[in-house]
Amino acid sequence: MKTSLFSGAALVLALFAASVPAQTPGTPWDQLKPEQQQLLLQMHQERWNALSAERQQRMLEGAERWQKMTPEERRRIQARHEKFKHMTPEQRAQMRERIRARREAFERLPPERQQAIRDCKQRRRAGEDVDCRGLWPERHGADESASGG
């Protein structure tokens, strides 16, 4: 569990860290020598220790969500990350703003509505064919169909 949580946390770190321009593929993790893997893990530990408590908490929550995702959800997230890596800084800033606005809109909803959205998304993750867009205020519903959420 500890290893899978760490690997999930490492992936979340990668997803939320500043992206670098696309480069040629590097060496896969499983082809590194054990001492190289250990050194890299130590470097991640040092980076982790430098994070604020709030950032660490967000990373842990993200890692926990990752562990609960289906393989299809993980593929979708990875595809979105690839798309994000190829965006200009301006496009990334616009996307971050849309995400921030979406989160704030969600937080302004009554608790019952928030829970209904969570329940709907949980059902969708479980494989049910449900449309959660109708649970959002009208303006958000249009954004929802474009973002797949």
Image (cartoon, helix red, strand yellow):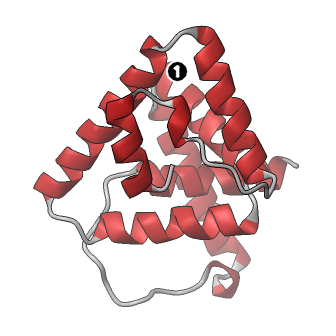
* Front one among 142 and 76: 142
Residue drawn at 52 percent across, 36 percent down = 134
* Front one among 26 and 107: 107
* CA neighbours of label 1 inside 10 A, class few (<14), some (14 to 19), many (20+): few
Residue drawn at 48 percent across, 30 percent down = 136
Name the residue furthest right. Answer: 1
- Numbered circles on residues, count: 1
Residue 17 makes an appearance in the image: yes
Q: Image check: 6 left or right of 79?
A: right
- 101, above or below 10, in the image: above
Residue 67 makes an appearance in the image: no
Q: Position of residue 107 (x, y in %)?
A: 47, 16
* Front one among 81 and 130: 130
Res 63 quadrant in image: top right
Q: Position of residue 72 (x, y in %)?
A: 68, 68
Q: Image check: 88 left or right of 68?
A: left
Amino acid at circle 1: Ala
Residue drawn at 43 percent across, 64 percent down = 81
- 2, above or below 129, in the image: above
Which residue does the numbered mark 1 point to in the structure image?
53
